[in-house]
Image: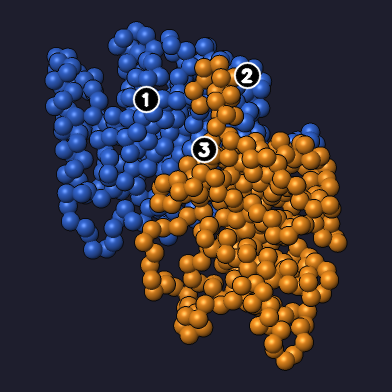
Amino acid sequence: MALEDVCKSRSRAKPASLLDFDVPVAECLQENPPRSGTPQNPLPFEMSHGTTTLAFTFQGGVLAAGDTRSSCSGRVSCPDAEKVKPIHSHLVATSSGTSADCTLWKRILARELRLYQLRHGRRVSTGGAAKLLWHMLLPFKGTKLCVATTLCGWDESGPAIFYVHSDGRRLRGTLFSVGSGSPYAYAVLDQAVESGMTAEEATRVAREAVYRATHRDAYSGNCVDIYLVTSTGWTRREREDLKEEYYRERKNRQGGTV
Amino acid sequence: MASKGALCGCIPSQKCANKKPRKLLAHRVVSKMALASVLNQNCAAFSFGSRQTTAFDCGPGLSGVGLESTSGDNFRFAIRNPMRPVVEDGDVESKIQFLHGTTTLAFKFQHGVIVAVDSRATAGSYICSQTVKKVIEINPFLLGTMAGGAADCGFWERMLARQCRVYELRNKERISVAAASKLLANMVYQYKGMGLSMGTMVCGWDKRGPGLYYVDSDGSRVCGDLFSLGSGSVYAYGVMDSGFRQDLTVEEACDLGRRAIYQATYRDAYSGGQVNLYHVHSEGWTRVSQDDVLELHQRYKDQA
């Protein structure tokens, strides 16, 4: 299907420009653009950002981490979801919000970035990718589409993290945590994250932050995924089940009931 | 019968000096009348606080732990009587919005209980005060923290202090933390559903060692090792969970409590001001420190 889209775009008369991105917009939205206020079709259940994802820069790169619990109306629908996915060799994206929306838009973004790279021989910068995603989500502003993602990448200017939300926010920063477990993670990260950290220290801190969030937040849990993005590309740490950590810590606490 | 003094439905047999001390029966009769007198009024007798301002006044410092101030800044803590129809000039209850903008925490460890609170009071997005006392000293061995409506917390914890003293005089021994928290829980349970907003932690040291109970105006009473209340509590939990061990020294435990409140004030807009830290041990409670969060910010930055 990707090839089909490429071929379709080639059949157009004008040559491919730098900004020739295919921005998919649902037909119903073009006919009835959403007005601010309640949408016409209410959802059967309330969506919530049940997750913990975080991203921060350290010395030599960017770290992105997330839990793996996917929940749906109070039940765990998938205990090993992938919330942190690579987009291309030097860009990793975390997802929060509706998992279907996040998966779809990450794939669309990956497609557009790849096409750009094939056409122009260079990768889009992290900020550019974030801007593209923001632009693609703009027609859906005011609908119930919910995508809150952090794009973590390495480009010519070094490491960068951009937070993009489907309500139109696009922020650059050095530390972000998104989701229902984010306050718990923020508390741990604010204490420990410094700009001059090594990769091992950063991994340890990220793991601790996700662990604390999964401990207190009902919608976060199961395992933790950690990706590191450096100048040579992304590397993935093996998925770790936090249940073992919980039991280990309980044993070490010498009978304290936390 | 002295209905004013018997609001909390407890035993005021000392008010009826000329009657024989038929304690239990008097308790039931008096408590029924207390409730009846509350229900017969349009406003609960809290409003008598405006007449007896010295006894139960919150004072300027406690004007709003997260209270929405109405125009004219007149804090009427009147509660609509559910028996009577709604008055046309607007439901009193709907004007009061308790924002629970605060961070309080308490945890037990081997050397007692650490209690740490912030000191910011907000009304909507306005910061009323940065120097609010959110820890109430019930007696030299018991502390209560405040979250929710300042008037409710302050008033009920003072009633609790009175009841604890009465218990001490009658039984010639100090009240246990479990009993004190149960007294408080039972007192507020009578007003369940009437709009009280109080989330408190009763912390103390008794014969069984350190005691920590969470009591709130919905009627919950929970025993635990670690609690945090308020809008900033989520941030405090992250720090406390990472650093908590049963075998902490007093110094380490104080640092942990202080750090947890500081992190909460860093991220939560409704918490701030100073960190007030108390330590409850076998000889009672001591006020350990009061640190401004801005100074703590500098200190932690220099340490890092």
Q: Residues within 10 Å of mark 3 (few under 14, many from 20)?
A: some
Letter of the chain shown orange in the rendering:
A
Label 3 to label 2: alpha-carbon separation: 22 Å
- Residue B12 picture location, percent across and down: 24, 23
Identify the subunit bearing mark 2.
B
Task: Say which colour chain B has.
Answer: blue
Outermost residue on the bottom side: it is A13
Which mark is drawn over residue B181?
Answer: 1
Which mark is drawn over residue B248?
Answer: 2
Mark 3: which secondary structure?
helix
User: Which residue is depicted at the point 61% across and 34% down?
Assistant: B239
Q: Residues within 10 Å of mark 2 (few under 14, many from 20)?
A: some
Mark 2: which secondary structure?
loop
User: Which residue is depicted at the point 60% across and 65% down?
Assistant: A105
Q: Type of residue at label 3?
A: Arg
Label 2 to label 1: alpha-carbon separation: 26 Å
**Quadrant of res B13:** top left
Q: Type of residue at label 1?
A: Ser
Which mark is drawn over residue B31?
Answer: none
Task: Please report contact status of discs 2 and 1: CB closer than 8 Å, yes or no.
Answer: no
Colouring: by chain
